[in-house]
Amino acid sequence: MNFPHTYLTSHFSAPGDARGIPTPAEEEIEKHMILVRGDEVAVHEGEGEELHLWTLARTGTVFLGTWKDGEVWALDAESSADSARAALPDGTRMRSLREIAPMLEERERSLALSAVGMLTWHRDARYCTRCGSAVHATRDGWSQTCEGGHETFPRTDPAVITLVRDGLDRALLAKNHRFTNGMVSALAGFVEPGEDLEDALKREVHEETGLVVGDLEYFGSQPWPFPRSIMVAFTSRLANGAETDITLQREELASATWFTREELTEDLERGDVRLPPSTSIAHSMITAWRKGELS
């Protein structure tokens, strides 16, 4: 079962490489360059909340694919000593992708996500993991090669997230210590070496709440380039006969609570809690549960 959400879809054209790496066209076509600084991208702000990516007519470090009948590249403003450092034109500024993702069009959002993720990798991985020598970008930014000729590719860290439900179809929502303004969400964590996704999910739930999960059902996945993760989402239910009492791991969570649909709606209306951003897969799972769309 797969429910659409903002980050789910990628709109890249067919790649020219078996690894999925896009290849620039041989002929001379229009260039678009997305400017990135950390997790911020350059956008042009129109009336109201209308936003569009601001681009320069040039190439960059990473080739992202095709867009507007031309090529689109990504460039890190912090590593560029040329015109990318120049002042942005009126109506254009750098803004956090976390903040503006819901306001971008689908294709622009997909490109911005890849731009931030790939340039974060280039910024953080400056030396060869084999020999320790400096690396330079190869394959139009989709790999790095060191002085010794060792080639490496960007890595994605798998993480799991789950909306746990009990026998009464209540949903478990938790508040992480990092959350602000009363936000609650589903339980999530990274996959450890040697684990499959299902084991990682069951371990995370038990470590953080003491609960034992049984049945799992795949919900969907979303890229999360902060810095380089992919979130794999499952809905889950407590194991048969498992207790519903929560034993909270205080290092990770500030609270964890069972909600009925009515209780969550009332708390949301009062402003006592709020959900994750609509761009997140956690929001999609919680919304699907509230609508009775989960099996």
Image (cartoon, helix red, strand yellow):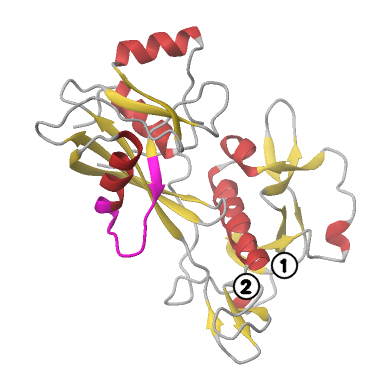
Q: Give left or right: position of 292 versus 148.
A: left
Residue 60 shows which numbered tag?
1
What secondary structure is found at the residue carrying circle 2? helix
Callout 2–callout 1 Cβ contact below 8 Å:
yes
**Residue at x-position 37% and y-position 37%:** 187
What secondary structure is found at the residue carrying circle 1? loop
- Dot 1 alpha-carbon crowd within 10 angstroms: few under 14, some 14 to 19, many 20 or more: many
Asked whether 188 or 252 is in front, the reply is: 252
- Dot 2 alpha-carbon crowd within 10 angstroms: few under 14, some 14 to 19, many 20 or more: many
**Residue at x-position 46% and y-position 9%:** 269
Membership of 196 in magenta stretch: yes
Q: In this view, does 160 lie above or below 181?
A: below
Task: Name the kind of residue labelled 2 in the image.
Answer: Gly
**Residue at x-position 25% and y-position 21%:** 170
Residue on which the image places disc 2: 141
Quadrant housing residue 175 = top left
Q: Is residue 97 above or below residue 237?
A: below
**Separation of marks 2 and 1 at Cα, in angstroms:** 9 Å
Q: Where is residue 275 in the image (x, y as percent from the top left)?
A: 46, 25
Specify start and end residues of the magenta stretch as a single range. 188-199
Query: Which part of the image, by quadrant, shows the N terminus?
Result: top left
Task: Name the kind of residue labelled 1 in the image.
Answer: Gly
Query: Which part of the image, by quadrant, shows the C terminus?
Result: top left
Q: Position of residue 151 (x, y in %)?
A: 55, 83
Quadrant housing residue 186 = top left
Q: Position of residue 154 (x, y in %)?
A: 53, 69
Membership of 251 in magenta stretch: no
